[in-house]
Image (spheres, helix red, strand yellow):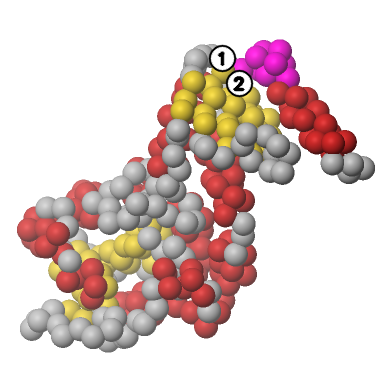
């Protein structure tokens, strides 16, 4: 069995990625092509779109291509995963398979900096997709395409020519949203993943409050709030969020993120302190002060 591994942030996926996959299926003698979405690239500090969304876009792009599999191993780890670890995992699933690793020419130039590079060289055969000026060494496998777009450039100008039709509307909608909306969505998704209940978001901007946004969620009981806190730290690390202060106990955890507060409360404490009522009264008070009906 021959397997190709094509990894990347795909933030967002673009027509260059489509070309690489199409050409790899055409010129490589492979039985399977694994597209590996990083949770967070080992060479980056943050991401824009959360990993599940990037995987969803890739699934829509390559739907119906029988040899293509969206491989979730790195996303499932919810951390930075070096390529050598992913390759070893694939090798454990397919011990006798020959493995190809597809990389861009810019990544190929930095390979010696990769984690356990020499070991990686013994496990895979590299296949390079050129971008820009690139003179390949002799005997290196090359995908005969020229990809002149990158995800970072696409985020900057969102040219529809480079966005696959299957995901065009979703990609444009996501990257043109208010950045605060993206942050709130990540937080709500992380809380929902770990079974937080009755999640509410209060917009306090312009209301003379010391933060712009307040998120309140109910826990399922004592200690669940601490579990939610750990999960938030894991999920939001790659998005560049800063936890300036955390006041945590079994019943009520408060997370200060500078311009945002997150309250994780047991149902009993939430009922007792009724923060929702306080915030709504604050909003009404500011309306009266400003003469807004």
Q: Disc 1 designates what residue?
A: 251
- Residue 227 seen from this side: yes
In the image, 33 versus 111, the foreground residue is 111
Q: Quadrant of residue 259?
A: top right
Q: Position of residue 81 (x, y in %)?
A: 28, 49
Q: Position of residue 173 (x, y in %)?
A: 62, 64
In the image, 182 versus 118, the foreground residue is 182
Q: Position of residue 258 (x, y in %)?
A: 52, 37
The residue at the point 40 percent across, 42 percent down is 237
Check if mark 2's residue and mark 1's residue have beta carbons within 8 Å.
yes
Compared with 233, 15 (above or below) is below
Residue range (magenta):
265-274
Q: Disc 2 designates what residue?
A: 265
Q: Secondary structure at mark 1?
A: loop
Quadrant containing the C terminus is: top right
Please identify the residue farthest to the right as the structure is shown: 293
The residue at the point 77 percent across, 30 percent down is 282
The residue at the point 51 percent across, 75 percent down is 157
Distance from Cα at disc 2 to Cα at disc 1: 6 Å
Q: Callout 2 environment at 10 Å: few (<14), some (14 to 19), or many (20+)?
A: many
């Amino acid at each position: 069995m021959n397997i190709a591994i094509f990894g990347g942030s795909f933030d967002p996926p673009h027509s260059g990625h489509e070309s690489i996959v199409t050409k790899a299926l055409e010129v490589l003698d492979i039985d399977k092509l694994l597209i590996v979405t990083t949770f967070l690239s080992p060479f980056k500090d943050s991401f824009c779109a959360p990993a599940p969304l990037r995987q969803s876009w890739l699934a829509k792009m390559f739907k119906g291509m029988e040899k293509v599999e969206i491989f979730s191993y790195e996303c499932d780890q919810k951390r930075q995963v070096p390529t050598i670890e992913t390759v070893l995992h694939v090798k454990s699933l397919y011990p006798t398979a020959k493995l190809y690793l597809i990389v861009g020419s810019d990544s190929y130039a930095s390979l010696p900096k990769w984690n356990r590079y020499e070991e990686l060289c013994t496990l895979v055969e590299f296949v390079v997709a050129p971008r820009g000026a690139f003179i390949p060494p002799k005997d290196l496998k090359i995908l005969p395409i020229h990809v002149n777009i990158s995800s970072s450039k696409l985020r900057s100008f969102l040219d529809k020519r480079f966005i696959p039709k299957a995901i065009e509307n979703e990609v444009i909608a996501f990257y043109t949203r208010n950045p605060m909306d993206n942050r709130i969505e990540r937080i709500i998704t992380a809380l929902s993943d770990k079974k937080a209940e009755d999640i509410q978001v209060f917009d306090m901007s312009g209301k003379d409050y010391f933060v712009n946004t307040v998120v309140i969620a109910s826990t399922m009981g004592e200690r669940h709030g601490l579990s939610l806190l750990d999960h938030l730290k894991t999920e939001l690390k790659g998005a560049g969020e800063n936890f300036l202060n955390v006041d945590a106990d079994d019943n009520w955890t408060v997370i200060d993120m500078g311009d945002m507060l997150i309250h994780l409360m047991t149902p009993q404490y939430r009922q007792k302190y009724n923060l929702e009522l306080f915030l709504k009264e604050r909003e009404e008070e500011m309306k009266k002060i400003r003469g807004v009906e």
